[in-house]
Image (cartoon, rainbow, N blue to C red):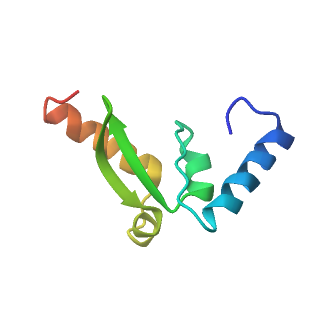
């Protein structure tokens, strides 16, 4: 929770987790560590379009991280000329 003091960051995480128990919650963040802590799925977007979605459980099963996936997507987009 970038930009929040520790108490407010914890409050925000708890609020998101409480709502996520019964609903889908959309969080926009560049902080991959936060996303790994409380998300189950992540959608990567570029220029307003979703370029890839991943389940964090699938990344963990493959022995990779969200950060590694991000850089792989960036390389792919650059190679395809979409960057």
Q: Residue at x 37, y 44 (%)?
A: 44
Taking the image as shown, residue 1 lies to the left or right of residue 48, namely: right
Q: Residue at x 45, y 47 (%)?
A: 67
Quadrant assignment for the N terminus: top right
Residue reaching furthest to the bottom: 61
Q: Residue at x 21, y 41 (%)?
A: 76
Residue reaching furthest to the front: 23
Quadrant assignment for the C terminus: top left
Q: Nearer the viewer, residue 7 or 17?
A: 17
Taking the image as shown, residue 61 lies to the left or right of residue 36, namely: left
- Residue 80 place in picture, x, y as percent: 13, 35
- Residue 30 place in picture, x, y as percent: 52, 36
Taking the image as shown, residue 77 lies to the left or right of residue 18, namely: left
Q: Quadrant location of residue 19? A: bottom right
Q: Quadrant location of residue 18? A: bottom right
Q: Is residue 29 above or below residue 53?
A: above
Q: Quadrant location of residue 39? A: bottom right
Badge count: 0
- Residue 16 place in picture, x, y as percent: 67, 53
Residue reaching furthest to the right: 7
- Residue 10 place in picture, x, y as percent: 79, 48
């Amino acid at each position: 929770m970038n930009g929040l003091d520790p108490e407010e960051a914890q409050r925000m995480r708890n609020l998101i987790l409480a709502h996520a128990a019964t609903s889908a919650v959309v969080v926009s963040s560049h902080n991959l560590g936060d996303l790994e802590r409380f998300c189950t799925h992540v959608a990567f977007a570029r220029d307003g379009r979703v370029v890839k979605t991943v389940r964090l459980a699938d990344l963990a099963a493959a022995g990779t991280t969200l950060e590694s996936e991000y850089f792989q997507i960036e390389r792919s987009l650059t190679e395809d000329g979409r960057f």
